[in-house]
Image (cartoon, helix red, strand yellow):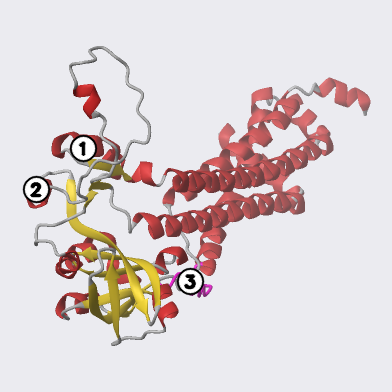
């Protein structure tokens, strides 16, 4: 019975200062709406930038790095036992970039339950021949099917199709930057020269745009077989093994495991993109900080309105306490008012936040550097809405707690004497 009475009194006090109550609720609504829209947009942007890099990056990459030998010949000599050797101008050891036993390694990796897929790759530095001018570049020999399945290769081809690469002999997909430099179009035949002087003619069957201009100016793609012919190598020749795993967080552990198991160099995606991940974390942190600040500002608005309400309703509070209402009851009345404002404002904020996010997600976003993106990126992560709802309740509760404490301690005798 008392709960119903407290609810009725709370509603009466709310409607008595309806304009101020609406202003407080609108403040909460605006804060939650901007919190949701800001986080949704920033998370969508982070996802876009992450995918731009991470979709094209293996979780673990196996390769051979050319380095000086850790053990020099003099260290093997028995003439200087226990001596410390100072050696200058050490040259890299004479070792090939090829991964030995690559077929056996890929077969073993495909049987690993933690591995989603394996894509071999050959990276060859070349020169694009344009008349008497040579442009430096890189040709990537790929398994077209695996590259498309694991690294969304097809999504970044703006002209032509990935399947044309494997169906057309001696073909190439050029980076858009290279194509512009060479003034070539679909169907043209270009000539490339390897560092060993081998010349090779390739037909352009597609144009590729990664969204990173410096990469698009040098990079191109062909099949593994074409690259092996360029290098004069057998069909087992592979310089990189790209691995996608089911749980990306396990990549550092698996990189160490494969390094020891297969005696190759290995790098994981976290190590390769540490600076990029730091940037995403900082942007997300700023978004949360701005959103939470908006909620706190709305909380101060509710606090001020409740303080003014208590000051104006001293007589009503005195009558309530004189007629048997305890300090806890008065406390409950003003907390109910605060939470009502918070719940109504929060619910409206979530709805308007979703609507604003959807509206932003429909705004056209056409840029030549990101051909796969047509509208502004938005993330509809349910966690943002949960955080917004919880924060609206917590903020309004705290905003109402201190004024309600003040109201519960009012002595009705002092008020009546003052009158």
Circle 1: is it few (<14), some (14-19), or many (20+) Cα within 10 Å? some
Question: Is label 1 or label 3 in front?
Answer: 1
Q: Nearer the viewer, residue 119 or 250?
A: 119
Picture coordinates of residue 361 (x, y %)? Answer: 49, 67
Pointer 2 and pointer 1: residues touching (CB < 8 Å)? no
Task: Please report whichever mark, 2 or 1, sits nearer to the chain's N-terminal start.
Answer: 2
Pointer 2 and pointer 3: residues touching (CB < 8 Å)? no
Distance from disc 2 to disc 3, alpha carbons, whole Å, reads 46 Å
In the image, 386: left or right of 412? left
Q: Name the residue under label 3.
A: 375
Distance from disc 1 to disc 3, alpha carbons, whole Å, reads 42 Å
Q: Is mark 3 on a helix, strand or loop?
A: loop
Tell me if residue 157 can be seen.
no
Q: Nearer the viewer, residue 52 or 288?
A: 52
Q: Which mark is residue 9?
A: none
Q: What element carries label 1?
A: helix
370 vs 302: above or below: below
Q: Nearer the viewer, residue 22 or 272?
A: 272
Distance from disc 2 to disc 1, alpha carbons, whole Å, reads 14 Å
130 vs 352: above or below: below
Task: Please report whichever mark, 1 or 3, sits nearer to the chain's N-terminal start.
Answer: 1
Query: Magenta residues, as a range?
Result: 361-371
Q: In which quarter of the image is the N terminus?
A: top right
Q: Which mark is residue 259?
A: 1
Residue 59 lies within the magenta run: no
């Amino acid at each position: 019975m008392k709960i119903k009475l407290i609810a009725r009194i709370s509603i009466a006090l709310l409607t008595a200062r309806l304009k101020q109550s609406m202003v407080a609720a609108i403040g909460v609504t605006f804060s939650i709406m901007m919190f949701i829209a800001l986080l949704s947009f920033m998370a969508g942007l982070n996802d876009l930038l992450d995918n731009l890099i991470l979709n094209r990056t293996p979780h673990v990459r196996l390769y051979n790095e050319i380095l000086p030998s850790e053990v020099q010949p003099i260290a093997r000599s028995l003439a200087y036992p226990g001596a410390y050797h100072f050696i200058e101008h050490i040259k890299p050891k004479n070792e090939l970039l090829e991964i030995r036993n690559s077929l056996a390694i890929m077969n073993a990796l495909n049987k690993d339950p933690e591995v989603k897929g394996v894509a071999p790759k050959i990276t060859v530095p070349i020169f694009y021949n344009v008349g008497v001018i040579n442009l430096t570049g890189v040709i990537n020999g790929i398994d077209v099917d695996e590259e498309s399945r694991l690294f969304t290769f097809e999504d970044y081809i703006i002209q032509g199709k990935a399947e044309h690469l494997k169906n057309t002999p001696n073909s190439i997909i050029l980076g858009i930057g290279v194509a512009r430099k060479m003034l070539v179009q679909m169907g043209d035949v270009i000539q490339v020269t390897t560092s060993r002087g081998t010349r090779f003619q390739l037909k352009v069957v597609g144009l590729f745009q990664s969204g990173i201009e410096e990469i698009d100016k040098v990079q191109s793609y062909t099949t593994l077989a074409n690259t092996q012919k360029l290098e004069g190598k057998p069909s087992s020749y592979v310089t990189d093994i790209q691995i996608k795993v089911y749980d990306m967080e396990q990549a550092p552990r698996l990189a160490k495991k494969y390094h020891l198991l297969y005696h190759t160099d290995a790098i994981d995606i976290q190590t390769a993109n540490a600076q990029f991940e730091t940037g995403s974390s900082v942007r997300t942190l700023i978004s949360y900080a701005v959103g939470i600040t908006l909620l706190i500002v709305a909380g101060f608005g509710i606090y001020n309105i409740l303080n003014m309400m208590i000051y104006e309703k001293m007589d009503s509070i005195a009558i309530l306490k004189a007629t048997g209402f305890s300090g806890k009851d008065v406390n409950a009345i003003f907390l109910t008012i605060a939470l009502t404002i918070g719940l109504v404002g929060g619910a409206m904020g979530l709805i308007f936040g979703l609507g604003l996010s959807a509206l932003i997600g429909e705004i056209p976003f056409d840029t030549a550097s990101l051909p796969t993106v047509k509208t502004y990126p938005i993330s509809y992560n349910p966690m943002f809405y949960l955080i917004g709802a919880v924060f609206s309740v917590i903020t309004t509760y705290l905003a109402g707690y201190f004024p309600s404490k003040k109201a519960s301690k009012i002595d009705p005798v002092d008020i009546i004497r003052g009158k």
